[in-house]
Amino acid sequence: MIIDDSFDVAAPVEKIWPLLKDVPRVATCIPNAAITEVVDDKTYRAKVSVKVGPVSVSYNATITIVSMDDATHTATLDIKGDDVKGRGGVRAAVVSSAAAQGEGTRVRLHTDAQISGVIATVGGRMIESVARKTVAEFAKNLAALV
């Protein structure tokens, strides 16, 4: 499943990009997500909870920074998560970029995700709308963090 989304933040890219690069700090902006361990400067463990329709799932996830390009303000992350109850998992490649947009910053997210298990079975059609709602909450929280 491919999900593309974007949002604007009323702050210059010079302020937004350092936040986007700081995985533990920016993770606080993601609803129902928390970094639980810093493995090294490119690898993090996290807990993430998601509700899709009638189904709630909690994942133990590993986030790996694949690349971080300061010149283009682009980051690529690899995310692997397994349902704590063993009912499926998620694998995702996320590419985020930040670009000056007038006085502010346009943040773009491109996610290529493979979702298995109960969420895919029960909530398959709702996943994209839940992802868009999560991105909107993330954008609001990021703006407040700035």
Image (cartoon, rainbow, N blue to C red):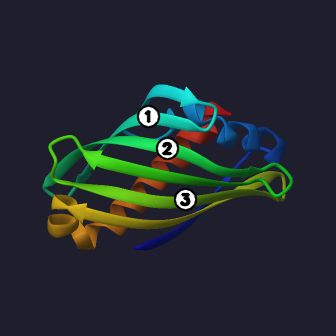
The type of residue carrying mark 3 is Val
The type of residue carrying mark 2 is Ile
Image position of 5 (left or right of 62)? right
Q: Secondary structure at mark 2?
A: strand
Name the image quarter holding residue 110: bottom right
The type of residue carrying mark 1 is Arg
Give coordinates of residue 46: x percent, y percent: 41, 35
Q: Nearer the viewer, residue 135 or 61?
A: 61
Image position of 78 (left or right of 62)? right
Q: Nearer the viewer, residue 69 or 137?
A: 69
Above or below — where is 31 with respect to 118? above
Disc on res. 45: 1
Disc on res. 63: 2
Instruction: Name the residue located 28 percent from the left edge and 48 percent from the top edge.
Output: 82
Q: Nearer the viewer, residue 17 or 45?
A: 45
Q: Are marks 2 and 1 in contact (CB under 8 Å)?
A: yes
Give coordinates of residue 80: x percent, y percent: 40, 51
Above or below — where is 57 with respect to 102? above
Distance of label 1 from label 3 (alpha carbons): 16 Å
Chain-order first, disc 2 or disc 1: 1
